[in-house]
């Protein structure tokens, strides 16, 4: 299981004695994870049972290198290493020791098994708890979407658990630091009431959201001699990667656990901490070095070339306004290209044209290109994907904040579910049916779909509004085409047959049959469209997870429909649904928000930084109910959050983004600007000012005006 092309420092890390604890730090791309894989191979080759190896990571997506390595290599006989996050370890341990703690913690049904909530189901129950408060006028001064309201409330609970303070103190912490309008203080008290009610509801019904799982593990299970002895005897060797992206709750556990491990390798990315808004704490991670036998620092990044490193240094100095007297190496000009434009669409055209030149003239693989922006709106994504399709270039987007319901394929499936369940009393309107037909039936354009709806839609027939194709006049049928009419008729008959059976299937089962028997067949829109198939699979998975938690409600309500409840929650914006996880092996241009790209911890040859004048590169999103910096261990209790802290935080955030992106660029960066943004306004954000400072300094040096 040896890894090829290891440099001496990696070999040294891998072959350390089996009783050593190493703290490994270095820049992103310096080969630290490869050293972790080599260490895993060394442990297995030296007779360490795989089930005694714990591989801990801050998020599941970062485990891909370890999973890939284990699946691509033959393992010694025995089990497999355990690859988990703190949340995964907590859930496994709670399931095993539930009878020992359920009564002590105060669950209302200690003899029944726990129900673990996903983000979606947690939002669902949060909505049920908060709705009476909203009816009383709570949060009426806030202009905020329902799903954002619920997610920020849950985020507060998660911060409390991950940082290590009582959730009942959240309101007081936020109020002590508030420096804005006094009338906003009542919002924090209202949020605290909702959080307390939600926690009581969870305890009464055996519901475990993420925050409660972490609290149970840290405050009850880990403090139990029985549980700690079980875990410490089961796992003897630790590989803990990307520790800077994890929360203090995980660092506390590992800090107490490290003396007991036979060996450990802790991997720290310098200039990391991109998940601060999710509770990451690089300072807490750095403190784990005190528990290790040796601190090792790897040489500079193997990915980032010297000109890009020089560009990184210049940009950081420009952000700090320290560039005026600094002499820049002319080689820096080979690291970046400025693509100026007057209008936003012109900028997008330039980006796509440059990508086309890279791929078709310089033979660059599409997967080696990333288009990054502070935010990726639907219009921006559509514009880029549409233009790249004209150049026959594959593209994919990764937007974790985008609801799956925003995908046209998902909305199509929702419309079909409404048609197939008339007793839900959720009849789709003409626009929904027209969009569904365009997406469902291959080669049916919007004009003919609109004609089909005009002639084949009957609002009077509430049970099933789609008329048979044969009832449409001859002229209309010829304009729509008989081929499209045949497919429309087949889809209509399938839905009618389902209704006539009179037995409502679970929504995920309904979608599985509909996709397999109709939508995926030749002549229909989902055939040969892998993206739509992926959306369907994710939607089915979302419904299944929702149903597994909501199912107990059937025992309390008659005529309860999980499918109807799911659609209602989606329609109200309560459930955002699972976001699409892009296939890493897909050879396509990646379109992604900058933070999402950084969190995925991957590198590319070419990066395009869009809309550099946008304040979103620098400015923190305002969250009226939570605050990632105040709800951390590094914030002094009672201190006010002023404009000074806001400015310094934004400055540090921008420098962290610049370092993170440049470390993950192997060749060249294109900085794309437009004088007029999407909204028709002119912006001059901090990233644009830093770029202009570099261009101005280079011009001064070339002109000899130093």
Image (cartoon, grey):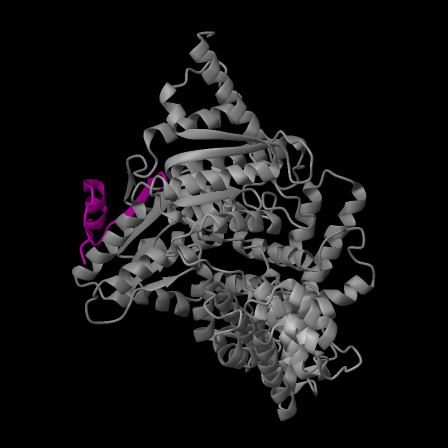
Please tell me whether residue 355 is drawn above or below residue 706 in the rendered image.
below
Of all residues, the one furthest to the bottom in this rendering is 501
- Quarter of the figure with the N terminus: bottom left
Drawn side of residue 59 relative to residue 564, left or right: left
Please tell me whether residue 640 is drawn above or below residue 541 in the rendered image.
above
Kindly identify the residue that appears in the image at 43 percent across and 46 percent down: 244
706 or 476: nearer the eye? Answer: 476
Kindly identify the residue that appears in the image at 80 percent across and 80 percent down: 460
Please tell me whether residue 655 is drawn above or below residue 527 in the rendered image.
above
**Is-magenta flag for residue 14?**
yes
Of all residues, the one furthest to the right in this rendering is 136
Q: Position of residue 354 (x, y in %)?
A: 45, 38
Drawn side of residue 298 relative to residue 575, left or right: left
Please tell me whether residue 441 is drawn above or below residue 602 in the rendered image.
below
342 or 7: nearer the eye? Answer: 342
**Occupied quadrant, residue 332:** top left
Q: How many marks?
A: 0
Q: Position of residue 68 (x, y in %)?
A: 31, 60
Drawn side of residue 2 relative to residue 140, left or right: left
Kindly identify the residue that appears in the image at 65 percent across and 87 percent down: 499
> Would residue 6 be visible to someone looking at this image?
yes
> Would residue 605 be visible to someone looking at this image?
no
Q: Position of residue 327 (x, y in %)?
A: 41, 15
513 or 163: nearer the eye? Answer: 513
Query: Which span is picked out in magenta?
Result: 1-28
């Amino acid at each position: 299981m040896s890894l090829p092309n290891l440099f001496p420092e990696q070999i040294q890390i891998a072959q350390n004695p089996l009783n050593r604890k190493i703290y490994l730090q270095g820049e992103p791309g310096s080969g630290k994870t490869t050293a972790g894989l080599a260490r895993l191979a060394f442990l297995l080759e030296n007779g360490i049972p795989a089930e005694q190896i714990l591989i801990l990571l801050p998020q599941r997506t970062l485990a891909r290198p370890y999973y890939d390595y284990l699946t691509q290599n033959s393992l010694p006989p025995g089990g497999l290493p355990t690859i988990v996050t703190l949340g995964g370890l907590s859930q496994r341990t709670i399931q095993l020791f539930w009878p020992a703690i359920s009564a002590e913690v105060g669950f209302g049904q200690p003899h029944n098994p726990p129900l673990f909530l996903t983000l979606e189901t947690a939002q669902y129950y949060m909505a049920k708890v908060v709705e009476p408060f909203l009816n009383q006028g709570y949060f009426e001064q806030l202009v905020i979407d329902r799903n954002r309201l619920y997610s920020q409330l849950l985020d507060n609970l998660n911060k409390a658990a991950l940082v290590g303070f009582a959730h009942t103190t959240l309101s007081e912490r936020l109020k002590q630091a508030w420096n804005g309008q006094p009338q906003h203080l009542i919002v924090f008290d209202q949020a605290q009431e909702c959080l307390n009610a939600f926690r009581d509801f969870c305890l009464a019904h055996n519901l475990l959201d993420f925050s409660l799982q972490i609290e149970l593990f840290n405050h009850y299970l880990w403090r139990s001699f029985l549980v700690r002895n079980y875990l410490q005897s089961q796992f003897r060797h630790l590989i803990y990667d990307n520790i800077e992206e994890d929360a203090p709750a995980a660092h506390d556990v590992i800090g107490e656990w490290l003396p007991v491990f036979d060996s450990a390798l802790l991997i720290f990315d310098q200039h990391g901490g991109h998940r601060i808004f999710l509770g990451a704490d690089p300072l807490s991670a750095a403190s784990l070095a005190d528990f290790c036998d040796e601190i090792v620092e790897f040489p500079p990044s193997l990915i980032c070339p010297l000109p890009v490193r020089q560009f990184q240094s210049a940009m950081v100095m420009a952000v700090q306004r320290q560039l005026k007297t600094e002499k820049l190496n002319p080689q820096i000009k080979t690291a970046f290209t400025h693509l100026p434009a007057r209008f936003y669409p012109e900028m997008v055209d330039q980006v796509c044209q440059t990508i086309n030149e890279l791929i078709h003239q310089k033979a660059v693989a599409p997967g080696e290109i990333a288009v990054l922006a502070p935010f990726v709106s639907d219009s921006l994504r559509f514009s880029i994907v549409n233009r790249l399709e004209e150049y026959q270039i594959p593209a994919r987007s990764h937007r974790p904040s985008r609801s799956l319901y925003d995908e046209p394929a998902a909305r199509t499936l929702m419309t079909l579910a409404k048609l197939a369940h008339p007793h839900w009393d959720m009849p789709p309107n003409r626009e929904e049916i027209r969009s569904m037909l365009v997406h469902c039936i291959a080669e049916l354009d919007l004009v003919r779909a609109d004609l089909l709806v005009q002639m084949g839609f009957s609002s009077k027939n509430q049970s099933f509004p789609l008329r048979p194709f044969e009832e449409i006049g001859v002229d209309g049928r010829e304009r729509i085409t008989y081929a499209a009419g045949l497919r429309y008729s087949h889809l209509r008959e399938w839905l009618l047959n389902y209704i006539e059976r009179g037995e409502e299937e679970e929504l995920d089962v309904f979608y599985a049959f509909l996709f397999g028997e109709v939508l995926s067949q030749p002549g229909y829109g989902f055939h040969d469209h892998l993206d739509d198939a992926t959306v369907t699979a994710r939607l089915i998975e979302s419904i299944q997870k929702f149903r597994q938690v909501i199912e107990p409600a059937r025992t309390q309500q008659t005529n309860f429909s999980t499918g109807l409840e799911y659609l209602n929650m989606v329609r109200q914006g309560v459930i955002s649904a699972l976001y699409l996880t892009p296939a890493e092996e897909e050879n396509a241009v990646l379109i992604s928000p900058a933070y999402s790209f950084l969190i995925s911890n991957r590198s590319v040859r070419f990066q395009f930084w869009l809309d550099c004048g946008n304040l979103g590169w620098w400015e923190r999103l305002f969250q009226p109910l939570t605050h990632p910096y105040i709800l951390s261990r590094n914030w002094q209790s009672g201190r006010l959050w002023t404009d000074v802290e806001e400015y310094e935080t934004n400055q540090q955030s921008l420098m962290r983004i610049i370092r993170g992106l440049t470390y993950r660029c192997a060749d060249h960066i294109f900085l794309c600007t437009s004088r007029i943004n999407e909204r028709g306004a002119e912006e001059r954000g901090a990233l644009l000012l830093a770029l202009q400072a570099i261009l101005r300094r280079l011009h001064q040096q070339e002109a000899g005006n130093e």
